[in-house]
Image: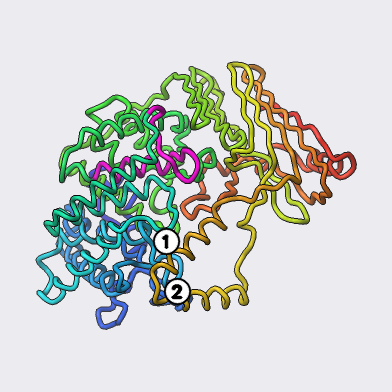
Amino acid sequence: MEEDKKNYSSPYLMHSLDALQRIVSLTNIDNLSSTFGCSHRDYWLYKTSDFPDAVRNFSSHSFALASIHPFFNKTKQYFFRELAKSSILYWSSIQHSDGSYDEFYPYERGWVGPTAFTLYSNIEAYKIVSEEFSKKNESNIMNAFKKAASYIAAGDKEGDDLANHHAMAYLSLTKAHELLESNKLKKDAKKSFRNFLKYHLIDEGWSIEYDGIDPGYLSASCSFLAKTLDIEYSQDIFEIIKIYSKTLKPFCYPDGCFSGPIGSRNTMHLYPYAFELLAKSDPNINYMSKFSQFSINSGNCITPNIMSDRYVHYRVEEYLITDKLFLEKKATIKKDFIIEKNETYLPKGGIYHFCNENDFLTINLSKNLVLDKYKKVENNKKWKRTSFTGIRILDKSGLYSSQFISKNSKATFNKEKIKVKGYLAKIPTENSFNIFKNLIFRILLIFCSNSTNASNYLKKSIRKLLMFSKFKKNYYFETSFDLLSNELIIRIESNKIIEPLDLQIGTNISDRYVPQSRFSRISDQNLKSSLLNQSEKNNVINELKKNKFSTIRIKI
């Protein structure tokens, strides 16, 4: 979008404009079409999808925010207002009778994703453009809000062990009870917050995402919780955001990267809203606010335009609602970010962090030793990055990796050396759909079409299949990292019949299936795909085939 650069109210606006234009292109703006307002281009235009993904209509709030933003002239504001209206109406029209919505496949009936996420965004959009609707449309929209809120309030039936989803459930129900003036929904919101607290580890300051700490989604939980404070201020929520901010600092890297494969879900996107809103209230929150703006300027931030078509809608909304804080003088531009010297160890999370003037190191022991390390170079002006994301072996029987969290692995830590040992897990996500699998899956969906319980059971099964690796004992490993010499020693052995085809001592690949991961940063592109060259890899593979063991030594 071509408006004058000097009018940018914040870096969040500047870095959302191209992506805002993109979600306009993803949306059907033909007001005579039956899919007018649908933001799922694969469905309404390409016809490569056989159902509309409701998550794409998270865009309603972005359009509504643009419709009142002073950056745009009145003609564009009117355009965005009409688009917000059409998006809300389309969203309300594709709802299942039980109040739920679909994201990945027909009759999915997702709980938080997509139902709670889109309930929140469409309520917020409606509050901005509510005067534009006829009484009939308003009645239909209100009914959709009530049904979606009821579905969320019924609770998790998917085995959704994701703290950020419970935070979003609380946010969506809080917004719903305010709009609908429902005491029951207020009680439901409080209950959902108590459910969130079940995943909250107060002693270490983080919350569980499947089986460990994930910084990207930890920042998301901060954002979702902070968005309820305009309705009802909570000291408990403020305290949670404070301690989460402190926990997140070791994942704020010197080159502007944020987290990545080091987290339980491999995410690298930072949700800035809570940190900009509350920066003046706490030094750790202020640190996160400064880092967020530094990260954007570094070029290593996952800005909206980097996100895929499915999730760009989330990022644009997050950036525009954060930019609104700058318009309201609640947040300020910051240019003085300095990496903090610190040493931290979180035993339950398996996180060790150390930083001084010349060295920066963050390690996740729980993921069988994943690390990101930086060292000052070039007259102490730049940081050189080295990453280790685990052992990956492509065997004739499948892909095996150390990069997962397992109770069967053992880790030891002291100030001189870190050791982990266990077995490589078989990764399930190498299996892809073909026409026969797709036909079988579609038949299953037809059987689920009239049953919420069947849909929930199917999604729970799919999540278990895709998200969690299979414990195998084909490859045993022992990995140690000497904190003094920076030497990485890896021993791989097997007493089974093995047929290794290739091997990678990884630097930036994530093995767990997480849709909001594996985005590309400039810093990642500067890493080699493996810490071993081809000749070294061949030697290890040959040793495994011949001797059933091999030892690797690498200076990090």
The residue shown at (60%, 32%) is 386
Of residues 44 and 421, the one drawn nearer to the viewer in this rendering: 421
Image height of 15 relative to 507, above or below = below
Q: Is residue 551 left or right of residue 249?
A: right
In the rendered image, which quarter is residue 27 located in? bottom left
Mark 2–mark 1 contact, CB under 8 Å?
Answer: no
Q: Is residue 240 visible?
A: yes
| Mark toward the start of the polypeptide (2 vs 1) | 1
Give the labeled residue for mark 1.
Answer: 310
Q: Is residue 26 visible?
A: no
Position of the C terminus, as image quadrant, is: top right
Whole-percent x, y for residue 373 in the image: 56, 29
Single out the mark in the foreground, 2 or 1.
Answer: 2
Image height of 144 relative to 543, above or below = below
In the rendered image, which quarter is residue 237 located in? top left
Crowding at mark 2 (Cα within 10 Å: few <14, some 14-19, many 20+): many
Q: Label 1's element? A: loop
Give the labeled residue for mark 2.
Answer: 448
Give the magenta part as a residue range.
203-227
The residue shown at (33%, 40%) is 197
